[in-house]
Image (cartoon, grey):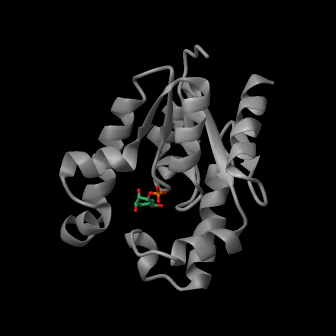
Amino acid sequence: MKLKKNLILIGMMASGKSTIGQLLAKKLRLRFFDTDFIFEKKMKMKIAEFFHKRGEKKFRNLEKKIILNILKKNNCVVSIGGGAFIDHEIRNIANKKHKTIWLNWTSDTLINRIKKNNKRPLALNLTNNELNKLIVDRSKIYSRAKYKIDCENMKKVEIVNRIIEVINQ
Ligand code: S3P
């Protein structure tokens, strides 16, 4: 598949952006970039450790630079961190120049998944209620993506096929 744009996967932590992104890229024979992975490789540090040592603000600045750079490419699948689309500049460029795809799940599913591991610093100190509020608040912004995929009860391969279906409509 030849695209002038990137396919950008957005959504909450634990919504499967990296896994689905890899599968989607493989199926469409496109390159795949995961900006969290690029961040960790560049900084030689896990994101959780970076948050702890240097704070969220510094993380957001560096994350933004990495993403804006990746968005200059085309013909790629890109998965971006759950907080990135909240930034209006990233969101505007992503929506104007590319195809943005929101992987949407219920709050229950997301909370269960997020609480299963401790690699997500933002969620570590939040109660389930607070996490639910974050999901609800962010969903209003995620809903500005061009495409929304309701992923609940779908297998990975079904999600990938659904994405291909909607972007070709
Ligand atoms: C974050 C999501 C994480 C990572 C960082 C902050 C967020 O990425 O960028 O921990 O603010 O939602 P994933 O969405 O890939 O977990």
Figure quadrant of residue 25 = top right
What is the tally of numbered marks visible in this picture? 0
Whether residue 95 can be seen here: no
Q: Is residue 61 above or below residue 121?
A: above
Figure quadrant of residue 134 = bottom right
In the image: residue 133, left or right of residue 62: right
In the image: residue 93, left or right of residue 108: left
Figure quadrant of residue 14 = bottom right
Whether residue 161 can be seen here: yes
In the image: residue 120, left or right of residue 20: left
Q: Position of residue 154 (x, y in %)?
A: 77, 54
Q: Is residue 100 above or below residue 11?
A: above
Q: Position of residue 56 (x, y in %)?
A: 31, 64
Measuring 62% from the left and 67% from the top, which residue is drawn there? Answer: 135
Viewport quadrant of the N terminus: top right
In the image: residue 90, left or right of residue 130: left
Q: Is residue 23 above or below residue 156?
A: above
Q: Which quarter of the frame holds ligand 1?
A: bottom left
